[in-house]
Image (tube, rainbow, N blue to C red):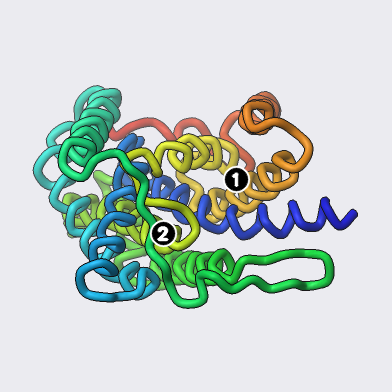
Amino acid sequence: MNLLLQGVVSGILVGGLFSIVAMGLAVQFSVMRVINFAQGVFLMLGAYLALFLKANLGIDPYLGSVAAFAALFLVGYIIMGTVLQRLLNSDPVLPLIATFGIAMAVQNLVVATVGATPRQADALWSDEIWHIGDVTVPVSRVIAFGLAAVSVVVLVVIVKHTRLGRFMRATSSEPVAAALSGINVKRVDRLAFGLGCGLAGFAGAIILPVLQASPFVGDQFMVNAFVIVLIGGLGSIVGSGIAGLLVGVLTGVGSLILPGSLVAALLFVLLIAVMMFRPYGLFGGKREALIYRSAGH
């Protein structure tokens, strides 16, 4: 029983981090119908930026997460404006291929410049451990989860209760009608894509005290994020957040009783089961709402 509780607690803490990355993907897909294969790379860049700030300026990675969000938001904004926006009205596979190419190029550039050796940075209370009954809880994971939860709340508030959020929802449902009503759809696209990339960079910074920064740190997060988005429902931001916690708990409990490879297989078994009974995910919309944009946009 204690072992099970330990797995659940650990899974929830990790699931919060999964949720940030997945919700960034969900924002991008819901607004632009773009599947961003570079999301894991943006997480990796956020981790390296936080590492640089810690090593050279002494800035704690938790504070550096703000800079990571801002920097990766700007990177995403520029990439959407210069590369992806040209492809949105064409074959929907082209943006996917473009983001995959960006991911491969950036990852290999990082390997060539800083090497593949994993690096880690200490943060506030990173060595502290809480003992709650028989459950061991690293404080660094609690802080990372807390920051992730705050970012999720802020994202939901932005989407639900701000002018930008209203524009994003309008662009998501009817981009042509949104443009005709005076909304600058291209600018909304850039802001939404930048927001998703910024969330990945933020996640990369807050996981630095927990994991090590390496050119491949985002790969597993990327795989899990895609599974989470599909389970939660393509384009469902809240669904991705809930599914992230679900996958985190499944991973945490499964890792205690199964080999690592079987835990990964278990995630895909869950995905297949959800797709069989809920083809659009647990919180997904109807199929016609997920079709890529018309050429009239």
> Residue beneath label 2, please?
208
Secondary structure, mark 2, is loop
Distance between the alpha carbons at the discs numbered 1 and 2 = 31 Å
Q: Residue at x 83, y 65 (%)?
A: 134
Question: In which quadrant of the rendered view does residue 251 lie?
Answer: top right
Which kind of residue does numbered mark 2 sit on?
Leu
The answer to which of 253 and 246 lies nearer the viewer is 253
The answer to whether 220 appears left or right of 93 in the picture is right
Looking at marks 1 and 2 on the same chain, the residue that comes earlier in the sequence is marked by 2
> Which quarter shows the N terminus?
bottom right
Which kind of residue does numbered mark 1 sit on?
Phe
> Residue beneath label 1, please?
283
Q: Residue at x 36, y 64 (%)?
A: 165
The answer to which of 217 and 67 lies nearer the viewer is 217
* Image height of 124 relative to 13, above or below: below
The answer to which of 89 and 273 lies nearer the viewer is 273
- Where residue 41 appears, as percent x and y from the top left, is 31, 42
Secondary structure, mark 1, is loop
Disc assigned to residue 294: none
Label 1 neighbour load within 10 Å: few <14, some 14-19, many 20+? many
Q: Residue at x 35, y 35 (%)?
A: 35
Q: Residue at x 47, y 53 (%)?
A: 211
* Image height of 247 relative to 279, above or below: below
- Where residue 249 appears, as percent x and y from the top left, is 69, 49
